[in-house]
Structure formats: C-alpha cells, structure tokens
Amino acid sequence: MNLNQVTLPVKNMELAVNFYLTLGFTQIVDTPHYARFSCPDGEATFSLSLDSDANSGGAVIYFEHEHLEELVQTLIERGIEFEQMPTEQRYLWTEAIVRDPSGNKVKLYWAGENRLSPPWKVHKTL
C-alpha cells in the first residue's frame, strides 16, 4: 500500500489555502469546500476540507525538508510565525512548529536516516 493523502479540517478555506501556498506547496484542486496540494519534492499530496466544526489543533502534519534552517528563515521572511524554532528532539528529529489558520499543528522537520531507521527500529508484520 501507499499513502495517498491526508486531509486536514479547516474553518476558513481562503486563509488556509493562502497559508499553505506561503509554505511553498502547489495547489492542484480548488473548490470552495476542498483544496488539494502537491509537495515540492516527491509525489505526496495533502488536502483541506472546509469544516465549520473543525476541532482547532486536532491534527498534526509533518513535512520533511533537508535544509530545515534555510526553509524556516525563508518562511519567517514571508511572515510565517513559528511556535517553535528548529529544535532537536529526543527521538532524533529536528523540528520547527507552526499552526495553520485553523489551529492544525504543522511540523517542519529533518530526520535524515532516523526517519525510517531510528536506532530503536523494529520489524513487525503479520
């Protein structure tokens, strides 16, 4: 199997779309109630769905970028405010945190080899 996409609930589609465009994503679907984006690298996509009852802060989405410090600086110059600047975590990822206009947590990170092969990796299958 391959993950197709993750959909985030948003309260205001226009604000949310502008936020993700500012982060550098390309919008590929545009309707009043649904938007979809492609990532600059790879084939991953994610979408936004208008939900007036969106639970603020109910979702966390991760976007990986090898040059995290440079990306964060570029986004600060574009007016993005960070809740957390790039910080090395105990699980060996460096993460910066922002929130989209609906309160969804967005983690920009770099994990290198630790993304798929951390020192504590297990191999379980049925």
Image (cartoon, rainbow, N blue to C red):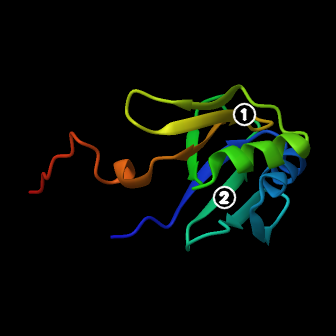
Q: What residue is rendered at 46% in x and 39% in y?
A: 93
- In percent of width and height, residue 82 lies at 75, 31
Residue type, label 2: Ser
Query: Around disc 2, counting alpha carbons within 10 Å, would you say few (fewer than 14), some (14 to 19), or many (20 or more)?
Result: some
Q: Which mark is residue 99?
A: 1
Q: Which mark is residue 1?
A: none
Q: What residue is rendered at 56% in x and 74% in y?
A: 43
Q: Is residue 76 above or below residue 67?
A: above
Q: Choose between 35 and 122: the one closer to the eye.
A: 122
Q: Which mark is residue 47?
A: 2
Q: Choose between 123 and 2: the one closer to the eye.
A: 123
Name the side, left or right, on which 94 lies relative to 71. Answer: left
Q: What residue is rendered at 37% in x and 33% in y?
A: 91
Q: Choose between 113 and 28: the one closer to the eye.
A: 113
The part of the image, by quadrant, that contains residue 98 is: top right
Query: Around disc 1, counting alpha carbons within 10 Å, would you say few (fewer than 14), some (14 to 19), or many (20 or more)?
Result: some
Q: Tell us which disc is closer to us: 2 or 1.
A: 1
- In percent of width and height, residue 47 lies at 66, 58
Q: Is residue 106 above or below residue 115?
A: above
Q: Count up the numbered dots.
A: 2
The part of the image, by quadrant, that contains residue 37 is: bottom right
The secondary structure type at the circle numbered 1 is strand
Name the side, left or right, on which 126 lies relative to 81. Answer: left
